[in-house]
Image: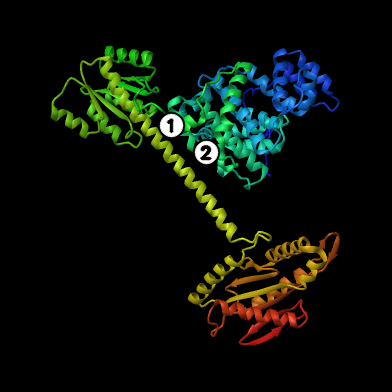
Amino acid sequence: MTSLPRLDDLRVGGVLPTPKGVALAVMELCQSDSATMEEVARTVMTDPALSGRLIRQANAAASAGRPVVSINEAVRRLGLGLVKQLVLGFSLIDEFSDGHCAAFDYQQFWSHSLLMGLSMQTIARVSRMGPPDDLFACGLLARIGRLALATAYPSDYAEVLQATREGSAAELAEAERERLHIDHNRLGAAMLGEWGFPPALVEPVLFHEQGVDAPFAEGTRNYQICQALSLAARIGDLGLAPEFARHALVAELLAVAGRIGILSEDLGALLDPLMESWAAWGELLKVPTTSLPPFAVIADGPAQRIGADLKGPPLRVLVVDDEEATRRLMQAWLADECGHAVALAPDGRSALALALEQHPQVVLTDWVMPEMDGIELTRALRATDWGRSIYVIMLTALGSEDQLETAFAEGVDDYLTKPFSQRALRARLMAAGRYVRLQEDWSRDRAQLKRIASELAVSNRKLERAALTDALTALPNRRAAISILGQAWSASRRSEQPLSVMMIDIDRFKSINDRHGHAGGDVVLAAVAKLLRESARKDDWVCRTGGEEFLVICPNSPLEAAAQSAERLRKTVAGKPLTVDGKTFAVTVSIGIASRESDTPDADALVSRADEGLYEAKKSGRNRCCLVRAGRKLLGPE
């Protein structure tokens, strides 16, 4: 298991979120060995809102039977450990509904976290990966590290969030480490560990943002919970996304769901009731939620044609004009009436510096300005990687065809002739908005394709390894052995270096199967394989070719050296008695060794010679090595 971060080892300079009041009293009670459920229930009863939430959760957990109506019964049904976790989560929602970090949206954070918790609860019921209520608490607090950083470092974290507002979770974590020397995943995992969450939940929380790259073996419980958290985070993103952005999230949502066996046709049946539950819980906890159409509608894409919404999503707009009155007028209309984020610059040079800092999506620039005019600004923007995708609208009193041709040749996307009306400007911004959305969709699709390609590559590597690996012993299988031997043979022929092989067979293996059954035989096979792998030389390849037979390929090894190595392997196996079903007994192997000689026609002939030596070792009493040289068979000592 991965070493989990401890809160005491992390350098956190500020005050972290901690429960207070009734929640603190409940947590302290639950940590006491002598605490009873009645004492915990009496403490919870002093907070009517908390009592109602626990009763609701207990009823949500009950699939059938009489509904829970008292806090005593709710505590008994949920158990002290889960009560502590739920009380902690509900308390933090109440206490940290706002804060001092200007760029951190506290309400949106809890809205997303609540949807993650409910998603984990629903996924657990469908997949049976764990108790639904435990996973509800895990999902609710999976991103608590973000709240902790906003609480401990409100000013610094605001700057981190501003700098990464368009970035991914991985980019946010990297920026956190650079600025604060810690990221939200490590801090959140440490806090959950401090609060008593089991490692089986804390470890997936630590890695859930890595998705398919999380360091868990596929099929393990940690892998399942980690991928479920990744899916819950995507569902949270979908719940908070503006209407125009929802459809673009569907492909990745389906891909992540597929990792834990949730088919695309089942996802709607899971999500639609979940969104209703989110709204009900949001009302109870005073957390904002949104109303979403059925998932099938979102998956089919937006019904309205592109550009039907005159206002569109808010844009980052840079207005460049040397007349202050014009700048202020456009700022008032663009920001106040249309909701766009507007920055102002008096000339092209200062606009270029501002664009470098803020990366606007649209630039509205006057043509004629001091120091750097609109054409020079456009040319400078297009010379940068980040400036090529900016939508540039030129404002000009000039209108000849030659001048417009020059403007478009330098990279201008559209123009407005002064004086212009608000209606004309709105039409141009509608076109700019469509362009920006298409750019974002393209970037998102490209990122998804890269992610899917990466996942396919990982899956293909896993499948390739599985196809070349013996499942019982984890050694290269017969198919892999043929490939390895072919490569070694070719290298030996090219470089005129020696090449030897060993054929190894477990003695009297049938009698082992007869006495201990096939399960006992598998124990012996796995143990012998482990001994051979650990005792073989570093450059040798130990492969299982079938049944109780093994092939050892020894590149750059003459016959005498291979014979010495074979004798060491034989003694190692004979000297390590094995225990099966409580019975300890010795296991021995017989080994045939051969080396490439001038008359050896191919790799198959080399293996056949080693096989002849194996047969001779068996015929001569087993637990022997026999090497074959130029047709002669030489037995080693017993």
Residue topped by disc 2: 254
Q: How many labels sit on residues?
A: 2
Mark 1, Cα crowd under 10 Å, few <14 / some 14-19 / many 20+, is some
Q: Nearer the viewer, residue 155 or 278?
A: 278
Q: Residue at x 69, y 14 (%)?
A: 49
Q: What amino acid does circle 2 point to?
A: Leu
Locate residue 60, reporting x and y percent.
69, 25
Locate residue 513, reporting x and y percent.
78, 67
Locate residue 409, reporting x and y percent.
21, 34
Disc 1 vs disc 2: which is toward the camera?
A: 1
Residue topped by disc 1: 301
Query: What's the colour scheme?
Result: rainbow
- In the depicted structure, whether residue 103 falls above or below residue 379: above
- The answer to whether residue 486 of the structure is visible from this angle is yes
- Residue 232 lies in quadrant: top right
Question: Quadrant location of the N terminus?
Answer: top right
Question: Quadrant location of the C terminus?
Answer: bottom right
Mark 2, Cα crowd under 10 Å, few <14 / some 14-19 / many 20+, is some
Locate residue 484, reporting x and y percent.
56, 68
Question: Does residue 242 appear to the left or right of 406 in the view shown?
Answer: right
Q: Residue at x 71, y 34 (%)?
A: 131
Q: What amino acid does circle 1 point to?
A: Gly
Q: Residue at x 80, y 70 (%)?
A: 511
- Residue 371 lies in quadrant: top left
Give the mark, 1 or 2, whose residue is nearer the N terminus: 2
Q: Are marks 1 and 2 in contact (CB under 8 Å)?
A: no
Q: Considering the numbered disc 2 on the image, is that residue within a helix, a strand or a loop?
A: helix
- The answer to whether residue 210 of the structure is visible from this angle is no
Q: Considering the numbered disc 1 on the image, is that residue within a helix, a strand or a loop?
A: loop
- Residue 594 lies in quadrant: bottom right
Question: Does residue 412 appear to the left or right of 603 in the view shown?
Answer: left
